[in-house]
Image (cartoon, rainbow, N blue to C red):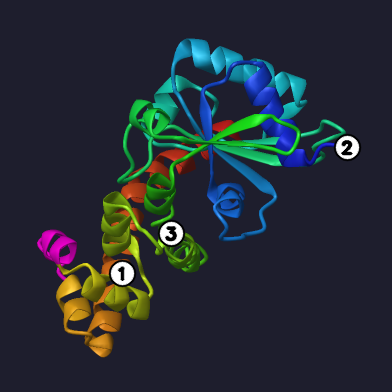
Amino acid sequence: MTPSPIQTVLSSMRTHGVRCLLMGGQACVFYGAAEFSRDTDLALLASPANLDRFKAALSALQATRIAVPPLEEEYLRRGHAVHFRCSHPDAPRMLIDVLSVMRGVAPFEELWERRTTIETSAGEPYDLLSLRDLVQAKKTQRDKDWPMVRRLGEAHYFEHREGALPDQVLFWLTELRTPELLVEVALAHRGPAQEVLPRRPLIAAALSADLPALEQALRQEEAAERDADRRHWEPLRAELAVLRRLHR
């Protein structure tokens, strides 16, 4: 059986010992919140040795960089993304986007410690961002990311609500974006809801089952995250504009 393009990319990373974690739309598929994507988004450890391994994997994939900035540790550590396109016959035109530093997301070593490892039907293991970290990484200014944040929370809730563990309940209270489900969780777990309340004040509306107030608070929460993401990227975009002019 011919491997899928994503399997080809991830197999190359594993073969070359690259420390990276799948994120983005492809990771959402694995977590049951389907999102079609032609990109392979990776969180990549920015170290000289790991970048050498990554370059070897790119060579095997016949991948070339398609935009600024260059693949250098200094740019990755400042939060830039670096973009590549594959020419390998098993991954034609597959895009690979790598990041090492993301707004609001823990350092790579922490992400690695709490990663999720899945195994394909062929028995090959792949490493993904944990669900909690993937949700945080998806809190961007892009319109397409917020429905996915909501679906990720819903998928996890419906899979685990029977016999939920304490850390799962805390995750729902912290991250669920579906008003009705948030009310359901808060009323069923009042103690944890009170614990989360100081850092997520909209839980008060969930505890009182005030859906209009809760919906408004969720919109305000999303708007604040979008604004924070815009401010995060402003200096990086300015730097990219300078790099593009120099490249031309």
Whether tag 2 and tag 3 are in contact, CB under 8 A, the answer is: no
- Secondary element at image label 2: loop
Q: Position of residue 237 (x, y in %)?
A: 42, 46
Q: Which residue is mark 3?
A: 160
Could you tell whether 214 is left or right of 208 in the image? right
Mark 3 surroundings within 10 Å by alpha-carbon count, few (fewer than 14), some (14 through 19), many (20 or more) = few
Q: Nearer the viewer, mark 1 or mark 3?
A: 3
Marks 1/2: CA distance? Answer: 43 Å
Image quadrant holding the C terminus, namely top right
Q: Which residue is mark 2?
A: 2
Q: Residue at x 90, y 37 (%)?
A: 1
Q: Which residues are magenta?
A: 191-201
- The residue sitting at the top extreme is 49
Q: Nearer the viewer, mark 1 or mark 2?
A: 2
**Is residue 115 visible to us here?**
yes
Kind of residue at disc 3: His
Q: Position of residue 196 (x, y in %)?
A: 16, 60
- Secondary element at image label 3: helix
